[in-house]
Amino acid sequence: MYRNYWLNKEWTYEDLLARYATKNSNTGCYEWHSYKSKKGYGVLRVEIRTWKAHRFAYTLVHGEIVKYQQVQHKCNNPPCINVQHLVLGLPSDNVKYMIRSGRRASTVGEKNGNSKLKVKSVEWIRKMRQEGWTILEISILYGVSKSTISEITRGSNWKI
Ligand SMILES: [Zn+2]
């Protein structure tokens, strides 16, 4: 339904803006004018994957993010894909419950096995520790070792 005809094209953030967004000069939002979800988020299909548009925009600019990490709107405007209006949010409590109960522990880790930690993730891992996530939970979510998480939270070898 959300077929994307640029399947062979490598996307850039600028492409996305030019093709699918209109600037709202009052708010500075870049508002998605193509397909939207019921909640008003832009959606698009890139190869076999359906993306929320704001999440795709964030990924194009900042690199791959962990599947369960939320990307939130500072402007409270769901169709907006202006990356300056987007921030990473904590994974939801449901995700925490899933990890804690062990039901998805292995698949979460495997899917992100090759993911490299980005600067933004480092920042966020520290916040998650302050919010009471355990080192084990975070290591499962990011698919990296407990010692890596522990080094990050101690601040050694990781500079922001
Ligand atoms: Zn906005």
Image (cartoon, grey):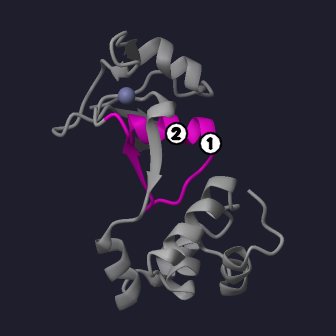
From the top left corner, tell me how far across and down residue 107 is, in percent.
48, 76
Residue 1: give x, y in percent of width and height.
27, 32
Residues in magenta, as a range? 51-75
| Mark 2–mark 1 CB contact (< 8 Å) | yes
**Secondary element at tag 2:** helix
Say which residue appears at 59% left-offset and 70% top-offset: 126
In the current view of this chain or complex, which residue is farthest to the right?
A: 157
Quadrant in which residue 49 is drawn: top left
Q: How far apart are marks 2 and 1 (CA)?
A: 6 Å
- Residue closest to the eye, 138 or 115: 138
Q: Please give the name of the residue rendered at 44% of the width and 34% of the height, measured from the top-left corner.
A: 85
In-front residue for pair 152/91: 152
**Residue 59 position by quadrant:** top right
Residue pointed to by mark 2: 58
- Quadrant placement of the C terminus: bottom right
Using residue 126 as the reference point, say whether residue 128 is left or right of it.
left
- As displayed, is residue 59 above or below residue 144? above
Which quadrant of the render holds ligand 1?
top left
Q: Is 61 part of what is drawn in magenta?
A: yes
Q: Residue at x 55, y 18 (%)?
A: 15
Badge number at residue 62: 1
The answer to whether residue 42 is above or below residue 33 is below
Q: Does the magenta stretch include residue 8?
A: no
